[in-house]
Amino acid sequence: RFQLHQGLRLQYARLDADFGDAPLFPLPVKEVTQEHLSFDGSISFKARLWEQLHAFAAASSALRVPNVDDLGKVFESLPGMVNLPNPGLEPEKYYSGEIGLRWLHGKKLRLQCSAYRGSFRNAITSQPATYEGRDSIFYNGELSAVLQQSNTARASLCGLHASLSVHFFEWLQWSSTINYTYGRIHTDTTDYPLDHIPPAFGKTELAADAGRARFRVEIHYHRAKSVEDTN
């Protein structure tokens, strides 16, 4: 009726990058060396509340070490804005938790709902910066504001997931999923959207297995993403 799982991970990462000469754009840094050591863990449990109803929960921590692209890329994120390298970038630390319920009716029907929340420390996001004391430089012939990948104070995200699958017959199955995620970067003055958060989205599928032939019809859908939710 009850299962408990625990895990512990030791992670070591070292990065040595030599950018050499950059003929297209003079980089503010020639070499980067970083070393990081961390302990991360996870714990999860599953309990059978009734014959058909199961509950589950999980908590974990993780570390994302900056890669060469994070530390050394130069790119125009938007017209009039250019991202420059930041050799002092630190790893992101992430803590997450999830709870959910699963209802099973034999092999015919399966319903699952879950909610999760995560918290970032030293979240990596693009922030206004300076280059040789200037907040704007000419890049590709255009005066552009200087940005850098930087460690902000903190960020968080939360979301919901639901899925339903029905086996009408052994050869015919219908399933549907829906996902919603909300992410924000927190500062002392205001909160603003976290990068790369999709709008609510889902998929509905009808699948048939007729022995040597398999048929599948899928519908993918998502809501529009408003300007207010774009960073």
Image (cartoon, rainbow, N blue to C red):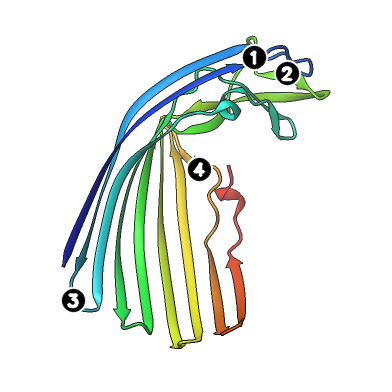
Secondary structure at badge 4 equals loop
Secondary structure at badge 3 equals loop
58 with respect to 148 (left or right): left
Report if the CB atoms under discs 1 and 2 are less than 8 Å apart: yes
* Mark 3 → mark 4, Cα distance in angstroms: 39 Å
User: Most extreme residue toward the right, as rendered?
Assistant: 141
Identify the amino acid type marked 1. Tyr
| Badge 2: residue crowd in 10 Å (few <14, some 14–19, many ≥20) | some
Task: State the mark number for residue 137.
Answer: 2
- Quadrant in the picture for the N terminus: bottom left
Q: Is residue 210 above or below residue 128?
A: below
Identify the amino acid type marked 4. Leu
Which dot, 3 or 4, sits closer to the camera? 3
Task: State the mark number for residue 194.
Answer: 4
Identify the amino acid type marked 2. Ile
- Point out residue 21 in the picture as x, y percentages from the top left corner: 72, 12
Which dot, 3 or 2, sits closer to the camera? 3
* Mark 2 → mark 4, Cα distance in angstroms: 26 Å
* Mark 3 → mark 2, Cα distance in angstroms: 65 Å
Give the mark nearest the N terminus, 3 or 4. Answer: 3
> Which picture quadrant has residue 69?
top right
Task: State the mark number for residue 50.
Answer: 3
User: Most extreme residue toward the left, as rendered?
Assistant: 1
Report if the CB atoms under discs 4 and 1 are less than 8 Å apart: no
**Residue found at x 40% / y 23%:** 36
- Point out residue 171 in the picture as x, y percentages from the top left corner: 50, 86
| Badge 3: residue crowd in 10 Å (few <14, some 14–19, many ≥20) | few
